[in-house]
Amino acid sequence: MANVSKEILDTIMSHMEKLATTKTIMGEPMKVGDKSVIPVMKVAIGFGAGGAEGETPGKEDKKSTAGSAGGGGGGLSISPAAFIVIDKDKITIHGAKPKMFDQLIGQVPDMVEKIVDAAKKKREKKE
């Protein structure tokens, strides 16, 4: 029976892997006016499988019967998490749920800018 459950889980996982790719998480860039917008998705996957074996003892004139069964299922949820907006030389990230993501996402452009500035200063020192 363990092999049946493993086969079910393997089948479910292979189908889930096909659905949850990097193209699913980072959407195709879209042009909105002179800006490019890249959607970033949150992907949640859940699955389960199980099986059982059993035997029914036979009565006086009937033989015992044995059997096994297995089953499984899964689900995939995809929802927008953020949007990356590219406007000329400026990159901003906007949370799909502003109350949850504003603080974290709002800090990303500043961090990127600080990293770029640090790299420029390092290059200038070498020159």
Image (cartoon, rainbow, N blue to C red):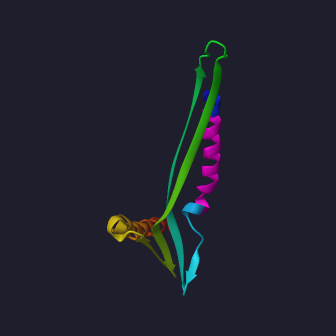
Magenta span dominant secondary structure = helix
**From the viewer's perspective, is 108 left or right of 64?**
left
Image quadrant in which you'd find residue 99: bottom left
Q: Nearer the viewer, residue 74 or 22?
A: 74
Q: Residue at x 63, y 28 (%)?
A: 68
Q: Residue at x 60, y 21 (%)?
A: 55
Q: Nearer the viewer, residue 119 or 6?
A: 6
Please provide the residue range marked out in magenta: 5-23
**From the viewer's perspective, is 96 left or right of 20?**
left
For the N terminus, which image quadrant? top right
Relative image position of residue 7 (x, y in whole percent)? 65, 36
Q: Residue furthest front?
A: 61
Q: Nearer the viewer, residue 10 or 27?
A: 10
Q: Residue at x 58, y 23 (%)?
A: 54
Image quadrant in which you'd find residue 21: bottom right
In the image, residue 27 lies in the stretch drawn in magenta: no
Image quadrant in which you'd find residue 59: top right
Relative image position of residue 124 (x, y in whole percent)? 46, 69
Relative image position of residue 94 (x, y in whole percent)? 42, 72
**From the viewer's perspective, is 51 left or right of 114?**
right
Q: Residue furthest bottom?
A: 33
Q: Tell how many labels.
A: 0
Q: Residue at x 58, y 62 (%)?
A: 24
In the image, residue 9 lies in the stretch drawn in magenta: yes
Q: Residue furthest top?
A: 60
Residue 73 to residue 81: above or below: above
Relative image position of residue 90 (x, y in whole percent)? 47, 78
Residue 12 to residue 113: above or below: above
